[in-house]
Amino acid sequence: MTDFMGRRLEQYTMKRPKEVLIVTAQIAGQDDQVTIFKGFSSSLMRPTSFDPDVPVLPAEAEIITIDRVASPYNPDAPHYLQQGLTIETMEQLLSDVGV
C-alpha cells in the first residue's frame, strides 16, 4: 500500500460525501481502524496528527478490509452499504468516481 491509496480513498469520500469509509489496516505490525469522511482521515485506535499532510494510512500500511457506511456515521448503529471490501474491489469504485 502507498500513501497514494490513502489519498485516493480521501478523494473518493469527497466525491461521495454521503459515505464514510472504515478501513481496517495493519500499520507497523499493529491493527488500526481508520475512518475517512469528506476527504479527511482519522484513526479510531491511535492518535491522529493535527497536520493533514501527515498520512493516517502511511505507505507501509496494509489494508485488510474496507467498509462503506452511510453518513452520518453512528458507531453504535452503523448503516453499512457494503462490508469487507478488498482493495481490489474498492479499485472499481475508485475508478467509477474518477480517482
Image: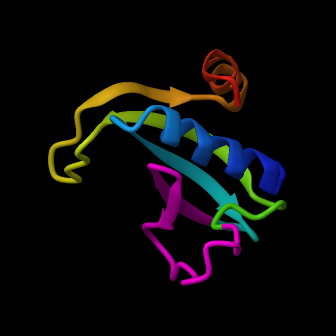
Q: How many marks?
A: 0
Q: What's the residue at 64%, 29% (across, down)?
A: 86
Instruction: Using the image, determine if residue 27 lies above or below residue 88.
Output: below
What is the basis of the colouring in this image? rainbow
Q: Point out the residue furthest to the left here.
A: 77
Examine the structure image and report whether residue 48 is included in the region drawn in magenta.
yes
Q: Position of residue 28 (x, y in %)?
A: 76, 71
Between 38 and 36, the one nearer to me in the picture: 38
Q: Position of residue 91 (x, y in %)?
A: 71, 24
Please state if 74 lies on the left or on the right of 16 as rendered.
left
Examine the structure image and report whether residue 93 is included in the region drawn in magenta.
no
Tell me where the magenta segment starts and ends, as one range.
Answer: 31-55
Q: What's the residue at 23%, 33% (across, down)?
A: 79
Please state if 1 lies on the left or on the right of 85 as rendered.
right
Q: Position of residue 94 (x, y in %)?
A: 65, 26
Q: Position of residue 50 (x, y in %)?
A: 54, 84
